[in-house]
Image (cartoon, coloured by chain):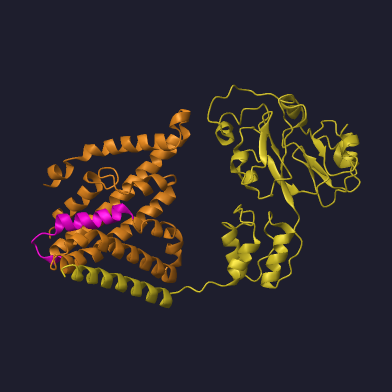
Amino acid sequence: MEILFPVIAVSIIGLICGAGLSVASKFMAVEVDERIPKVRACLPGANCGACGFAGCDGYAAALVEDEDLPVNLCVPGGATAAKSIGDVLGRAAGDVEKMVAEVRCSGTCEATSVKMDYNGLPSCSAAKLLFGGTGLCVYGCIGLGDCAKVCPVNAIHIGGNLARVDTSVCIGCGKCAKTCPNGVIAIRPASAHMVVDCNNKQKGANTRKACKVGCIGCRLCERNCHNGAITVTDNLASIDYSKCDGCGKCIEVCKAGCLVALNIANAEVVNS
Amino acid sequence: MDFKGLLAIVMAAVLVNNYVLSQFLGICPFLGVSKKLDQATGMSIAVIFVMVLATAVTYPIQYFLLNPNNIAYLQTIVFILVIAALVQLVEIILKKYIPALHASLGVYLPLITTNCAVLGVCISNVDSYMTGAGFGASFVQALFNAFGSGLGFLLAMVLFAGVRSKVEKANPPECFKGMPITLISAAIVSVSFMGFAGLVDNLLG
């Protein structure tokens, strides 16, 4: 019967621990709002941070806590997520415009060239530290793929020293835009008709030297836009997507070829 | 208990008998959580906290319950049981009363529930400081040893997080990438700690 005492002793210790824990969990229970898991279920779970919170869990908790927080901040989830969250919380959903990333650079190997034989770390931010990057143009895409590394959905691929976004996969979270050391990547509405695929803010002559397809800031597009959607600031054209109707006039007059048509019926005609 | 003796205990635990680098306990979190410095620090602070607390609970159990009844062989199972329950209790308490601390430690607390470094500290405390000096004095020694062991864990984690961030950028050969180069660098860091052998005896002895 020597075994009895140890068995009883360990059992009692176990019982005390168990009882203590269950009492503690009862008395010190933190009440979790039951709506949080419901809201969380509406979100896509990519944890991309496009809403401005740490992840989907953070956004769901913030939504339940803060009555005034818009329900349509989730870019990947889009209108579907906003609507279902609105249903759970009893708030109006509002519209969500699908956003995608745009690499504002057309500097392929043919259009521009490199100024150094770079053998350092395969990272844009490291290359940027050396004379502003590997390319002749210090504003353009460095092409070492820092953006592709952070992309949660693998929408970015590097081809010809240039990052390109697969807009059908892109969820518009903006991680790449934050990572790019040159700020080449912008987030635009997926429905945009035109984009300026250049980020060079130098004067025209200097831009020309660096790249064949850079925006030289000639203002032809600005003058020819009948909606006033294009403005040229710092020698670089930019488009107000809300005003642009996709007439394609700007592409016809653009000498540099930095304007690119998207989403318009006669895109092929205009581009050629 | 003199100040010098306690200092010697803490220094020995941090540098000479470092749990990770000299005794090879707690290697799992050491390799797993040392990728980023802030995570490594968070984890280590949680470990310090749990080590001291676990010693404070298990030492009296050994002293007053196991030893007098000649059931010291139940040490391992009882300690694991008590430590696991303790960590859970700490988590519940933190969640309720200090949510900020819980948010920063939260992920690591369950991870160290049955961490062998924590159990190792409890057992080595019982082995080393269960002397005839009476409960009070030896208990304080054990607590300081636990605190020092936690500090040693922190030191190892912070050092290794730094080493690892360099190694990540060093672009090692393909066959060494990832775990192999991490284990090799861990071994080298561990070798560097051999230099501390005899330090405490000669400095404070």
Q: Position of residue B123 (x, y in %)?
A: 22, 56
Q: Quadrant location of residue B185? A: top left
B97 versus A243 height, above or below:
below
Q: Is residue A18 visible?
A: yes
Closer-to-camera residue (B46/B183): B183
Q: Is residue B85 left or right of residue A101?
A: left
At horizontal 39% and vertical 54% (from top left) the residue drawn is: B43
Closer-to-camera residue (A53/B128): B128
Q: Position of residue A197 (x, y in %)?
A: 76, 37
Q: Position of residue A257 (x, y in %)?
A: 82, 32
Q: Quadrant location of residue A160? A: top right
The image quadrant where one finds the C terminus of chain A is top right
At horizontal 69% and vertical 46% (from top left) the residue drawn is: A170
At horizontal 37% and vertical 72% (from top left) the residue drawn is: A21
Q: Position of residue B15 (x, y in %)?
A: 24, 45
How many marks overall?
A: 0
Q: Is residue A26 left or right of residue A8?
A: right
A240 versus B81 height, above or below:
above
Closer-to-camera residue (A24/B72): B72
Which range of residues does the magenta coloring cover? B115-136
Name the dominant secondary structure of the magenta segment.
helix
Q: Which chain is orange?
A: B
Magenta stretch: includes residue B129: yes
Magenta stretch: includes residue A177: no
Closer-to-camera residue (A112/A39): A39
Q: Is residue A189 left or right of residue A85?
A: right
The image quadrant where one finds the N terminus of chain A is bottom left
Name the residue furthest front: A1
Q: Is residue B172 visible?
A: no
B197 versus B49 height, above or below:
above
Q: Colour in which chain A is shown?
A: yellow
